[in-house]
Image (cartoon, rainbow, N blue to C red):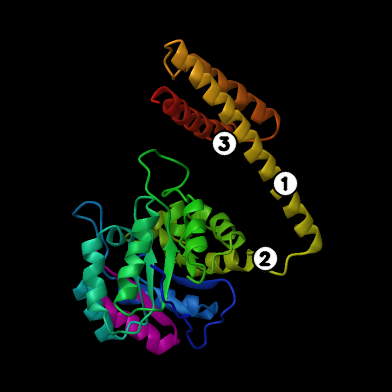
Amino acid sequence: MELELERIQLPGVPEERPVVIAGPCSAETEEQVMNTARQLASKGLKIFRAGIWKPRTKPGGFEGVGVEGLAWLKEVKQETGMYVCTEVATAKHVLECLKAGIDLLWIGARTTANPFAMQEIADALKGVDIPVMVKNPVNPDLELWIGAMERLNQAGLKRLAAIHRGFSSYEKKIYRNLPQWHIPIELRRRIPNLPILCDPSHIGGKRELIAPLCQQAMDLGFDGLIVESHCNPDKAWSDASQQVTPDVLDYILNLLVIRQDTQTTENLSELRKQIDECDNELIQTLAKRMRISREIGTYKKEHDMTILQTGRYNEILEKRGSQASLCGMDTEFAKKVFEAIHEESVRQQMEIINK
């Protein structure tokens, strides 16, 4: 299904990259919300975010102030002129936000992963013209992400955007949630006119990672950023380690290098031709390798040998990894490439054996 989209145009918000949405992870008190909003507004920020309802992994933690916090967002809007947005996870949340005049909504990763919840929200928003941003699901499932936006689109919502907040992993890594940049890149390829924002706070999980993640997002052509900013991050009631002060956020944004998507130069065009030639040679080399693999499959069939030769497979991975390292490439990259090549070789040999 092709999404029917319209541009998200907010009067007074510059359309150049990056559009920046900032504010605390959670609205905690009226004083905290207003203090943070005033500081962000003084830095020129136009869109304020704060979580009112907070889904938590386990019960007992701070789960948001609820409806009371919507009045604080209305106060932010009235005093500073900033647009305000918050997360919704149920139809009731949606109705309360519409009643309070919230300008934008976002849908969290856990909700995106639940088709029933997404349909409930889509039904509650039917006939309403409001921008909605959809975070990627917790697991790296592009179809689920697109499906969530399709449900909203079918309900008549056309001002949609995606938020890339990274993907959960059982293994502990440098990031709280792995970026897996190839997934939002594929989303951009599939739906070119869909705005994509990056959430460096949830990807990094640590405030020192926010700046480099913001720059990576800009280098990849993301349209905007949604960053958690708190007047006193160390005292935050939720996700304290991934929030920055408005002053630090302003410093990060001022250091960003925004590379424009300008017309391709003659030199770049020539380099791309060389890439195309290399790719053609790669395909031809792979085709030759597969022909040899099929011949090996025939030999194994004639001599009643098993297809998988573990010793030989391990030898290939070790040798090619070492060669890749000597050529300035990552050994893990080489391993993945040759694992894929081996998988296709086995598949082709299986066809020979089963004939």
Q: Amino acid at mark 2?
A: Arg
Q: Please, what secondary structure does the residue beneath circle 2 have?
A: loop
Image quadrant where residue 323 sits:
top right
Q: Magenta segment range?
A: 63-89
CB under 8 Å between discs 3 and 1? no
Q: Amino acid at mark 1?
A: Glu
Q: Which residue is mark 1?
A: 277
Q: Amino acid at mark 3?
A: Phe
Badge 1: few (under 14), some or many (20 or more) residues near its Cα, within 10 Å? few
Q: Which residue is mark 3?
A: 333
CB under 8 Å between discs 3 and 2? no
Q: Earlier in the sequence, mark 3 or mark 1?
A: 1
Q: Which residue is mark 2?
A: 259
Q: Earlier in the sequence, mark 2 or mark 1?
A: 2
> Residue 88, position in %: x, y?
28, 70
Q: Please, what secondary structure does the residue beneath circle 1 have?
A: helix
Q: Please, what secondary structure does the residue beneath circle 3 have?
A: helix
Is 81 within the magenta?
A: yes
> Residue 83, position in %: x, y?
42, 82
Badge 3: few (under 14), some or many (20 or more) residues near its Cα, within 10 Å? few
Is 201 within the magenta?
A: no
- The single residue placed furthest to the top in the displayed view is 303
Compared with residue 187, is residue 79 higher up or lower down, i.e. above or below?
Answer: below
Q: Quadrant of the N terminus?
A: bottom left
